[in-house]
Image: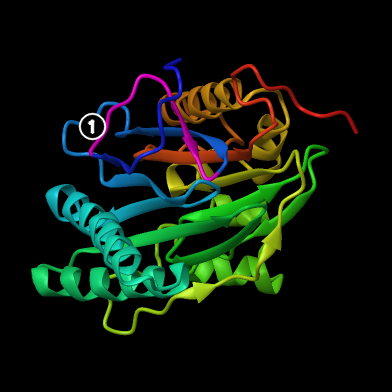
Amino acid sequence: MAEPTAPSVKLYLDQTMAEAEMQPIAGGLAAVYSSRCPGKESPNEDGAALIPLGESSGLLVVADGVGGARAGQEAASMAIRELQHAVERALEEDLPARTAILNGFENASKAIQELGFGAGSTLAVVEVQDDTVRTYHAGDSMVLVVGSRGKVKLQTVSHSPVGFAVESGLLDEVEAMHHEDRHLISNALGMAEMRIEIGPSWKLAARDTVLLASDGLFDNLHTEEIVAELRRGPLARVAEALASHALERMVKAVEGQPSKPDDLTFLAFRRSGVNGGGAKTEPKG
């Protein structure tokens, strides 16, 4: 596992990573993993980014391009780069992070539309300010905040017919995992009526873990399986387990278990003072 380096903007575009990369961000530590679908030769249509805003603030970002091959990869890359550029302009003009994020979504959606070949991209962003987080998303790349005892404290709703059916109680998670329309999304950057869902401001407890991921993770592991892994030790170990478990499901279908080969990208974050693979250890209690 690579050692953490000094905070700076980190973009993960069209990656095929053998292991997660550990990076300091927003007064904490993040584990980032992104790789194309097993056996796939075309580009990885997922992307991720870490964008520092200050010593104890920053943005955690995951995007999943749609449209196939280069179209999807270009849309995801455009989503992340437009967000980065919006943040850079906001910092120069001393604008709030919220303004930068919303501008990034809107600029990226317009730019993807102008590509003219029907591409699109999901975009999930977590704004970290000290011990507080807020989510922004369009599409079905999801965000979880999970406590040390496995409580799901925050979970975004996928912008898809299946996602809304689960939220309304019409489908349970098992039915949703195997639904024939699970791959359909109803909102994404590049759509004429793209909308940005802004979550509530949420205060993190010392041992909470924030997870952003493309559907390559959530289509192959049940939420309870993901939560179980997030509870188990340092972020480096968590990232290794999530990646290996999801990839195993993709390459070896087992009756009764989900198996949907896809690009896989996720980002897990914990605040400082929490065991993330370095010298710091988790507090008791």
Q: Residue 264: image x %, image y %? A: 39, 38
Q: How many marks?
A: 1
The answer to which quarter of the image holds residue 280 is top right
Which amino acid lies under the numbered mark 1 shown in the image of this protein?
A: Lys
Residue at the image point whose x is 19% and y is 52% from the top: 68
Seen in the picture, residue 200 relative to 271 is either above or below; the reply is below
In the visual, does 180 lie left or right of 210? left
Furthest residue in direction bottom, as rendered? 193
Residue at the image point whose x is 33% and y is 44% from the top: 9
Q: Residue 274: image x %, image y %? A: 69, 31
Q: Is residue 67 visible?
A: no
Q: Quadrant of the N terminus?
A: top left
Q: Is residue 269 magenta?
A: no
Seen in the picture, residue 44 relative to 108 is either above or below; the reply is above
Q: Which residue is mark 1?
A: 40
Seen in the picture, residue 233 relative to 41 is either above or below; the reply is above
Q: Which residues are magenta?
A: 14-26
Q: Residue 53: image x %, image y %? A: 43, 54
**SS at mark 1 in the image:** loop
